[in-house]
Amino acid sequence: MMDEASVLPGTIMLDPGDDPETAWPRIRDLGRAGGLGPLPAARLALAVSIGIGRQHGAAVIQIARVDDAHGSHVDATIHGGRASLASAPPGLVDVSRQHISAGGTVTQILRVNVNADAVNEDPAWAGTRRSSWPA
């Protein structure tokens, strides 16, 4: 097994009843700090908000960049929350896992892959969009 190198850009704590959407900008910014482009960071933030749910208890969200045998990605690990991603649109995250402990504690791990365009403000296709529009 290959060693994993992990950088922890940050942790966000939500108290019971906090609106998870208030954490959205911080999650997005931590995703960007982990190497995600603007759109992938926004996808991760939206997925985390859905994964926590509106009616939640205390929740802790850890955002980390992980470099391993599968490449570079940013993981959001949600401890707590009461929702699942079953109602989320497909494609928000590249990998989603859920672990339920013997005591019933739910942990969700949401992963978005870092691509070569992450350091750019625009994705690789941004320069081609005007040339493909009808005149």
Image: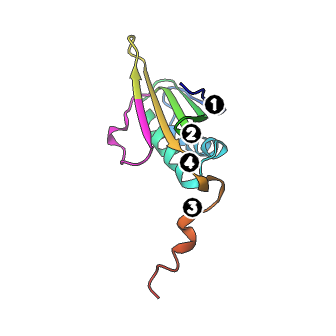
Q: Which residue occupies the foreground of this view, 14 or 119?
A: 119
* Contact check, label 3 and label 1, Cβ < 8 Å: no
Q: Position of residue 7 (x, y in %)?
A: 66, 32
User: Is 100 drawn above or below residue 12 in the view shown?
Assistant: above
Q: Which labelled disc corresponds to residue 74? A: 2
Nearer-N-terminus badge (3/1):
1
The residue that disc 1 covers is 6
Q: What is the crowding at mark 1: few (fewer than 14 residues within 10 Å), some, or many (at least 20)? A: some
Q: Is residue 76 visible?
A: yes
Corner quadrant of residue 83: top left
Task: Give the foreground label among 3 and 4.
Answer: 3
Which residue is at 65% across, 58% downward?
120
Which amino acid type corresponds to the residue marked 3 in the rendered image?
Pro
Residue 35 relative to residue 70: left or right? right
- Mark 3–mark 2 Cα distance, whole angstroms, equals 17 Å
Q: Bin the neighbour count of mark 3 within 10 Å (Cα to Cα): few under 14, some 14-19, many 20 and up.
A: some
Mark 3 to mark 1 CA distance (whole Å): 25 Å
Residue on which the image places disc 4: 41
Q: Position of residue 31 (x, y in %)?
A: 60, 43
Mark 4 and 2 residues: CB-CB less than 8 Å, in contact?
yes
- Label 3 vs 2, first from the N-terminus: 2
Residue 125 percent location from the top left of the image: 53, 67
**Disc 1 residue type (three-letter):** Ser
Query: From what the image shows, is residue 42 above or below residue 15?
Result: below
